[in-house]
Image (tube, rainbow, N blue to C red):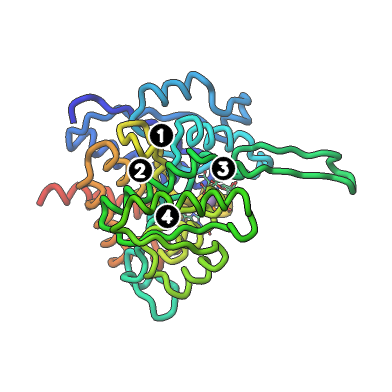
Amino acid sequence: MHRQKLIGIIPGDGIGPEVVRLGRQILEFYRDKRGANLQLWELDLGADRFLRDGVTYPEETAARVKNEASAVLLGALGDPRVPDNRYARDILFGLRFGLDLYANVRPIRALADRLVPLRDRSARDVNMVIFRENTEGIYVGVGGQVRRGTPDEIAINEDVNTRRGVERLIRAGFEYARANGRKSIHMADKSNAMRDAHELWYRCFFEVASEYKEITAKHMYVDAMATAMVQNPSQFELVVACNLFGDILSDLGAAFQGGLGMAASANLHASEPSRVAMFEPVHGSAPPLAGRDLANPFATVLSVGMLLSHIGMPDEEKRLESLVVRAIEEKKCTPDVGGTMGTRAVSEWVLGELGHAFDR
Ligand code: NAD
Ligand code: IPM
Ligand code: MN
């Protein structure tokens, strides 16, 4: 790697800083010990900052991220002191929408049999990737409230779906399947109820599918898919869905992997891999766990793996995943995945083993 890569780091709120600490240390390891030409840039954004000076996601910061950064690592945002979550949406959607990161890629892969909570299923049965549309849908914030607080109140959030937005996400799914040897794609929609918005998804899915003859395209209503995922997860290799359904299905899928502490994600402008991308654990700030050394850092470690792959170090993604597999096997992990160690002790173990991996 020649040109220096700027990596933004937003620890965020709650357990965010506790898990991102290890993420940052891993990046420092590659910078200091492996010659990776990285510049790490920690951003003071989140609830504390908002409560201190009202700043959410300043324009200058957004511009530097957009024009100079190669990647951003985000912990999580969300704090009970700010119940309306506005600052968190400014930052999270500032990144996802502002950088046009239209593909939220959420791998669901179980790294050990004992993490799979489904009866008679093992890790072999859980290996799918969710492609969640990440810039449209119900998330765009078009809507409003009228006569708020009265019995006549009206509350509206519009579901916005554009042909361009739907098609590029579906296409990203097919391209990924083709590049990674996945033989089938399922699309989850609700075209039986949402006759307009999801009829577009349905039509677009099969139109795009006709260009990828080697990949089997299957449609399911999202409610039926939720049942099918639990009953027979191994039938799913790749799932494409709108923003909201992708959000829900990915938390369901996280349960198959051992919980939210294990689920990693990438937010990509998939058609141009050289553009800045954002990486984050799927979980949130988990306020009840914060400050208790209980947070599982592996979702963040796996997200850092995806980040390293994005900036041209794909072998390191595999190395970090193998490390997590071994940690789970050897019970070097937090209680949510059957261990007895704290976040800090697990982090030390990971850093120690990462160092040894290169001594051998
Ligand atoms: P959450 O993911 O924060 O936590 C749900 C539960 O999952 C926790 O109580 C905990 O039992 C478990 N969990 C999550 N992460 C874990 C980890 N690393 N290790 C061990 N257990 C873990 O979801 P929530 O409680 O619905 O949301 C809390 C806050 O986080 C809210 O403000 C929400 O809006 C926000 N949130 C932010 C993001 C983000 O920044 N990307 C994502 C999801 C939720
Ligand atoms: C996620 C989160 C966010 C989302 C929230 C915090 C707005 O649940 O990243 O999955 O719904 O996208
Ligand atoms: Mn979510």
Is residue 55 among the parts visible in the rendering?
A: yes
Say if disc 1 is inside 8 Å of ligand 1: no
Q: Report x, y in % for residue 343.
A: 40, 53
Name the residue that disc number 2 marks.
Answer: 23
Whether ligand 1 has any atom under 8 Å from the Cβ at mark 2 is answered as no
Return the disc, 1 or 4, that comes first in the chain's sequence: 1
| Residue occupied by mark 4 | 130
Residue 247 higher or lower than 161, as above or below: below
Look at mark 3 in the image and give the residue it sits on: 161
Residue type at mark 3 is Asn
Q: The residue under label 1 is which amino acid type?
A: Ile
Q: Is the residue under label 4 in contact with that under label 3 (CB below 8 Å)?
A: no
Give the Cα separation between the discs numbered 3 and 2.
35 Å
In this view, 88 is above or below 243: above
Mark 3 vs mark 2, foreground winner is 3
Q: What amino acid is found at the position of numbered circle 4 in the picture?
A: Ile
Q: Residues within 10 Å of mark 4 (few under 14, many from 20)?
A: many
Of the numbered discs 3 and 1, the one sitting upstream in the chain is 1
CA gap, disc 4 and disc 2: 23 Å
- Mark 3 and mark 1: span between their CA atoms? 31 Å
The label number, if any, that marks residue 9 in the structure image: 1
- SS at mark 3 in the image: loop
**CA separation in Å, label 3 and label 4:** 18 Å
Label 4: which secondary element? strand
Q: Position of residue 338 (x, y in %)?
A: 40, 68
Location of residue 70 by image quarter: top left
- Is 27 or 222 nearer to us in this picture? 222
- Look at 63% across and 26% down and name the residue there: 54
Asked if labels 2 and 4 touch by Cβ distance under 8 angstroms, the answer is: no
